[in-house]
Image (cartoon, rainbow, N blue to C red):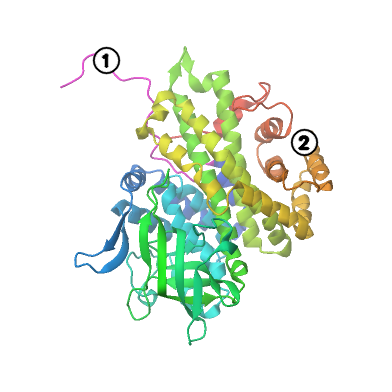
Amino acid sequence: MTATTHTVTNQAPPLVGHDVFSSDRALAEAVERHLAPELLDEARGDLGVLGKAAGSAQMRMWGERANENPPRLLTHDRYGHRIDEVVFDPAWHRLLGKSVGAGLTDAWGRPGGHVRRAAGFLVVSQVEAGHGCPLSMTHAAVPALRAEPEVAEVWEPAATSHVYEWGLTPVAEKAGALLGMGMTEKQGGSDVRANTTVARPLPADGEYVLTGHKWFCSAPMSDAFLVLAQAPAGLTCFLVPRVLADGSRNAFALQRLKDKLGNRSNASAEVEFDGTTWARRVGEEGRGLRSIMGMVAATRLDCVLGSAALMRQAVAQAVHHCAYRSAFGGLLIDKPLMRNVLADLALDSEAATVLGMRLAAAYDADTPEERALLRIAVPAAKYWVTKRCTPMVAEALECLGGNGYVEESGMPRLLRESPLNSVWEGSGNVQALDVVRVLRTEPAALDAFLREVGAARGADHRLDRAIRGVLVELADLDGIEARARRLTERLALVLQGALLVRWAPPEVADAFCAGRLGEDGGSAFGTLPHTLDLRAVVERARVEV
């Protein structure tokens, strides 16, 4: 029956059919800034192809389907054999195939690999954040694998492959493999030194069997996992394959999948090791944290990038809606108060993107100075960007009004996803205390931070004052643990401000310094000084379709 009461008007069209990469000016500029000139044409071409796919109706539909049809655990086959497999919607496999094929697990061995991969990760995470977990774990496992050359020789080529091959078979028979991680246990959480899983040596050098459990096992459908267990010499890192070289299944009992707030397309599991679970040592006995910290640092950067992706998608949707929606006699985007809100959101989005891409470039540079910067900047960025994500996405949802509260808009999915990265790989307190530890034990890290922000000194009086404020905070280390969150926040904001002053358009840098480092910003979004060029900030964030 045809409705005759009214014609639908005043609704924004879907934000599809665009290049997610090139329409994000801050991201495209970061790639140009951080890549060598000889790499740019190829990188822009590859990222443009990925960006067009990410903006297509088809890939958006895959993301929706993967989220609406979460994975299911099959503990046994039809005959009663224990199989411990996770079943996914076909859309999940299509997303992973697209992302693995774009090289998003291959950063460590090619020039500019981290910048290119970070940009791609930021693009595809806007489609469906859940499939970013196995991409992140597989990418981050490479430096840990290299602690044991014999292990790396087998597993690194599979992990960095551009071929996604689903199914549990021996790694030697696969064109590509995914890796997960299992560190946390029921009694310890982030305090992995409290782990009780036991590793008993076998006669063959480097081989062990494990007894214990993991409370959170990330990406349990993966081909292998890096786990921590107590060996005779202490906490040690191990590789646990799902399938052994002879084709038999390793003892890897999936007890249940977690029922999570968001990230529903991705599986997270509880797993038991029964005393016959075969494992290969990675690194030295008793040095498990040292072996796995490279993986943790890389996944923390992915938490920054994943939150930046959610923020970018949220602000893009909000600006797009307001560019089409009329109220009170005009387009919402032209209303001064709404423009203030949108500009404020856009500042956090651009600052998160610029910071994440700068840290990816530090991985590519791999100099002592850049490694020192990463040691303090990664936990600071992880703390602040992931914390800022949830209120920012909630405000963007509000820009769509009631439409934003409806599942079909996609905004509720972004909101449910938004707290995740602040929890994974160490919550806020863990990051802040890590910053304090670095400040106390690694003076080169603070020197690197001061050099980085010092490159922008003299360009904005509010930034200069904020840098001086940080130095005052650092001069008094009494009670620093109780002040760790405040200090970490200031470090992150000062670093973001310095990067924007150096590289962003003047109107963006001016507004950020006023709203985040000066005394003119309010506590809620939409409280920037009205004298700023907010229209230019909003237009920069807008996606043209």
Q: Residue at x 36, y 62 (%)?
A: 254
Residue 305 visible in image: no
Location of the N terminus by quadrant is: top left
- Residue 460, labelled with which disc? 2
In the rendered image, the residue lying farthest to the top is: 329
Residue 510 visible in image: yes
Secondary structure under tag 1 reads loop
Question: How would you rate the neighbour count of disc 1 (Cα within 10 Å): few for under 14, some for 14-19, many for 20 or more?
Answer: few
- Residue 6, labelled with which disc? 1
Tell me the amino acid under the disc marked 1: His
Q: CA distance from mark 2 to mark 1?
A: 54 Å
Q: Residue at x 58, y 19 (%)?
A: 336
Give x and y (percent) for residue 214: 46, 62
Question: Is 365 colored magenta in this rendering?
Answer: no
The numbered mark, 2 or 1, whose residue comes first in the sequence reads 1
Q: Which residues are magenta?
A: 1-24
Q: Residue at x 63, y 53 (%)?
A: 359
